[in-house]
Amino acid sequence: MEQLSNVATRSYKSYRARLMASLRLQARGRAWNTSLLSLAVATTFSSIALLTDDGMYGKAGPTVLVCVSVLALVASLVVTSLNYGGRSRDMFMNYRALQRLSVEAENLLANSVQSPDLVDRLSDRYESLLDDSENHTSADHKRADPGSDVSIWVLRRAHLLTALPYVALIIPLAVLAPIVSWFFSGAGS
């Protein structure tokens, strides 16, 4: 019965951590999509505005805008290679399978089923599910089990990495500020 209890506990904890990983990956994907879309729109508007007033961004403005555009391209390539959407979906599928296994083990425990073969099969399925997916992070584990001994700094670092694309929205705002100023100063009419 102890081995079945161990499988139930481990599968439940893994399911919860994989759920948190799926949510983290989904949030990061949304954040980077928002940031990159904003940057693309801002640099496009800036390029169009430069056609009307080539001094809008100062003497080095066109060069700075090209550099920002290259930065946007590099960031989009990096984000694409991280495949947040696909990884989030894979993690979702894995946590759902772990959840089903956890419920099955809990039901066997509740009904006092003590079949060693069944427990071995559940344990093998659990190990196979772990092998079929990338691992969750320590921060995912901490969010799934707040009482765990994982450092709070690990969780804060994960939050910072997820918030970073939103902080990067400062760049498109800075790029758009001269256009807004130019427009409201009467030069746009």
Image (cartoon, rainbow, N blue to C red):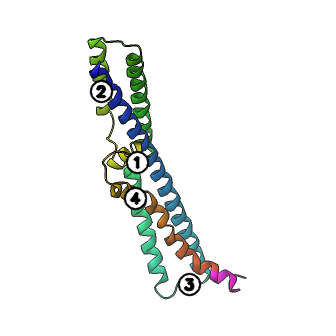
Instruction: Tell me if label 4 and label 2 are in contact, CB under 8 Å.
Output: no
| Numbered disc in front, either 4 or 2 | 2
- The Cα–Cα distance between marks 3 and 1, rounded to whole angstroms, is 38 Å
Disc number lying in front (3 or 1): 1
Where residue 89 sits: x, y (%)? Answer: 45, 39
Mark 4 against mark 1, which lies toward the viewer?
Answer: 4
Q: Can you tell which of label 1 and label 2 is closer to the viewer?
A: 2
As rendered, which of 103 and 137 lies closer to the eye?
Answer: 103
Secondary structure found at label 1: loop
Give the labeled residue for mark 4.
161
On the image, the x and y values in percent for residue 35 come to: 50, 61
Between disc 1 and disc 2, whose residue precedes?
2
How many C-alpha atoms fall within 10 Å of the one at disc 3: few (<14), some, or many (≥20)? some
Residue bounds of the magenta highlight? 181-189
Instruction: Tell me which label, 4 or 1, sits earlier in the chain.
Output: 1
Classify the position of the N terminus by image quarter: top left
From the viewer's perspective, is residue 162 above or below residue 86? below
| Tag 1 residue | 83
Density class for disc 1 (Cα within 10 Å; few <14, some 14-19, many ≥20) is few
Q: Whole-Å distance between the Cαs marked 1 and 2?
A: 33 Å
Q: Mark 2 points at which residue?
A: 6
Local packing at callout 4 (Cα closer than 10 Å; few below 14, some 14-19, many 20+) is few
Q: Nearer the viewer, residue 150 or 98?
A: 150
Q: Give the CA separation, mark 2 to mark 3.
A: 69 Å
Q: Distance between the residues labelled 4 and 2?
A: 33 Å
**Marks 3 and 1, the one that precedes in the sequence:** 3
Q: Name the residue under label 3.
A: 54
The amino acid marked with disc number 2 is Asn
